[in-house]
Image: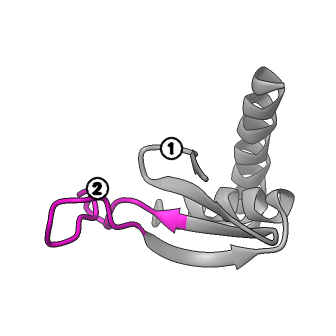
Amino acid sequence: MIIKLSSDYQINVQAYRNWILQRTTDAKGNVLLDAKGNLNPKSLLYFPDLKTLLRAYCEQEIIGSNEKLTLAEYLEKLKEEESKIKKMLEKEL
């Protein structure tokens, strides 16, 4: 099963509780395609559960911005990203 997180990321859920965070675009925002033109996402990390994956996704969103941040700024942005995820989950439930 595939769960779309954003235009850049998706979750690939496989049997036996394998949760895989995948990137669907490159650093320039181009969609990753195979030779036949089909979506070919890059698997970044594997997780035992959704909660851990979503935390890593939040961190990756911040890291991917390539901003120069202080620790306090990073932690504040992390809190903001986690809040967005919580709102998404509440809306879906």
On the question of residue 67 being in view, the answer is no
Q: Which mark is residue 22?
A: none
Q: Which residues are magenta?
A: 22-41
Left or right relative to 24: residue 13: right
Q: Quadrant of the C terminus?
A: top right
Front in this rendered view, residue 47 or 55: 47
- Which residue corresponds to mark 1? 6
Residue at 65% x, 60% y: name it: 57
Does residue 80 belong to the magenta stretch? no
Query: Which badge, 1 or 2, comes first in the chain's sequence?
Result: 1
At x 50%, y 44%, the residue is: 6
Residue 25 included in the magenta stretch of the image = yes
Q: Quadrant of residue 16?
A: bottom right
View extreme (front): residue = 15
The total of numbered circles placed on residues is: 2
In the image, what residue type sits under mark 1?
Answer: Ser
Question: Residue 63, position in %: x, y?
Answer: 56, 67
Determine which quarter of the picture holds residue 47.
bottom right
Can residue 77 be seen in this snapshot? yes
Residue at image position (77%, 29%) is: 87
Image location of residue 34, percent across then percent down: 22, 70
Residue to which mark 2 is pinned: 29
Q: Position of residue 33 (x, y in %)?
A: 23, 64
In this view, 8 is above or below 48: above
Query: Relative to 46, is 27 on the left or the right?
Result: left
Say left or right for 79 vs 41: right
Say what amino acid the circle numbered 2 marks: Gly
Predominant secondary structure in magenta? loop
How many angstroms separate mark 1 from mark 2 (CA)? Answer: 12 Å
Figure check: 50 above or below 21:
above
- Location of residue 3 with respect to 50 vertically, above or below: above
x, y percentage for residue 56? 71, 66
